[in-house]
Image: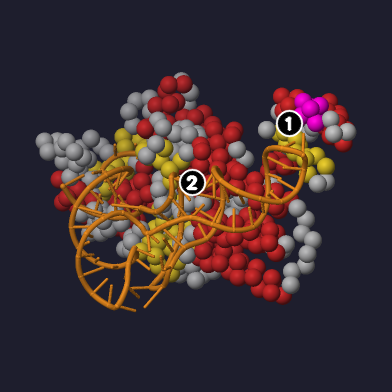
Amino acid sequence: MIQFYDTMQQKKVPFKPLHPPKVSMYVCGVTVYDTCHIGHARAYIVFDMIKRHLNESGYTVTHIQNFTDIDDKIIRKANQESVCITTITKRYIRAFFDDMQALNIQPANHYPKATEHMDAIIALIERLLAIGSAFIHTNGDVLFSTAAFDGYGKLSKKVLGELEAGHRDTAQSIEAPSLDFVLWKQSKSGEPAWPSPWGSGRPGWHIECSAMAMQYLGDQIDIHGGGEDLVFPHHENEIAQCESCTGKPFVQYWLHNGFVTLHRQKMSKSLKNTITVRDLLDSVNPGAIRLYLLRTHYRTPFQFSWDGLEETRRSLQKLSTCLAEPETQIPTAAQVADLETFDQRFNQALNDDMNTALAVGVCFEVLRYIQTQGVGRSLVRDCLVYLGIQYDVERSEARPLPASCEALIAEREQARSNKDFSRSDQLRDELLTHGIAVKDTRNGPTWAWV
RNA sequence: GGCGGCAUAGCCAAGUGGUAAGGCAGAGGUCUGCAACACCUUUACCCCCAGUUCGACUCUGGGUGCCGCCUCCA
């Protein structure tokens, strides 16, 4: 039985989709004005794992993930570069897909864009106006009236009155902000705009997800996910918009991943403390990145460090080395049973709210088992494939050995067999200056790029 | 101020009402001409104080510390 921690209920609950074996999953995507950082990588790896596991468990997941491709920051960036917004959005959508592919994240079924769903967005706003959940502000913007929705705050456990009175530290004399949020924004001159019954303008942020989620997945969806920073106000507002219209519970399971922090502070573009996926890919192979992120449960805050990444890279190397060796024994009946147990524990770990940290632990237990029992490599391989961790990337991407270095290695072997160790050590140092580390094994020397 | 979360070995990180997975580092050993790799062995009583219990790290209450949300944000 699969269970997930649902943010709404604040506890783990058994997963029962509305229309099994179908599962509908909407994951909030990125605003495309910059490259992805580790926080994005974590979020999308987490939901990639959830989708993989559900699909492997007999469900058929329809996964929708949006691109927010119209927004203040996109406009600002376009103005800075004196280009149109599509130049910006195309660039970063491309970069997004490159990063996701590198991280071995399986593509969603659709990636709807806000700018391509204006009809659905406008239709939804019209419905909200018709039922009195929205109103037209004096400045011409259309706003959602949070007071009109009884359940407002139920996801984030916020109470309306307190929210209005509450602020961060300073606050007392500051005017209480209204919780009403924009559905349709009047465009200023020079800004991109779309025609609407309320004049030319553009949609607010929250409405696009409601409109596109309902268009692709229906009024009620099984899983809605994203980073925990989206709980309020974004997901709270999505609930208000959808449920005001339909009167039905919008989402069965709200799943939120914890943050990646750097130096004990949330990694975010606005704090300018990001490390991009590209930075990571430049330093280690993608499998190590995935393993590093999956070693921590998805709801636990993740403290990024280069040391931690390096540590993981080394442990993956160990797995990789072991798996590269052929398995020579045929497992006994007892061993088959042992491996079966490991396999079950691996699966149960994932069933229990996607506990990839525990699942990874099982992989290393099997590694130990292989070393003492001589069997089990195929299980570990299967587990790593399941987790999307490519463990042999370094091998396959390795540059070939230059002929000159090949000769040096041969010469060193000759020196060694003559017991001329000062010469062989000298040659080892020389190879090192070419970036090649030589290691002696029973079966002769091996080498690797350093 | 309101709400939510976290606190486990040097570091990272799972977990269960009955005496703590795993990884990295460290120590000892095997292997090696040496080294590296690899392998074997080894390292904790779970933030503090009360309470419940035959028994709590795991449940309850209080405290302390840290983080996040309340503005765009995965």
Q: Is residue B54 left or right of residue A14?
A: left
Question: Residue A223 occupies which quadrant of the picture?
Answer: bottom left
Which quadrant: the C terminus of chain A? top right
Residue at x 62% of width, y 47% of height: A316
Of A121 and A70, the residue lying toward us:
A70
Name the spot of residue A261 as percent of width and height, x first.
41, 41
Name the spot of residue A230 as percent of width and height, x first.
36, 47
What's the CA distance linking mark 1 and mark 2? Answer: 33 Å
Q: Decide: few, some or many residues near mark 1? Use Cα within 10 Å; few <14, some 14-19, many ≥20.
A: some
Q: Is residue A313 magenta?
A: no
Q: Which residue is mark 1?
A: A436
Q: Decide: few, some or many residues near mark 2? Use Cα within 10 Å; few <14, some 14-19, many ≥20.
A: many
Kind of element beneath mark 2: helix
Q: Amino acid at mark 1?
A: Ile
Q: Which residue is mark 2?
A: A42
**A264 versus A57 height, above or below:** above
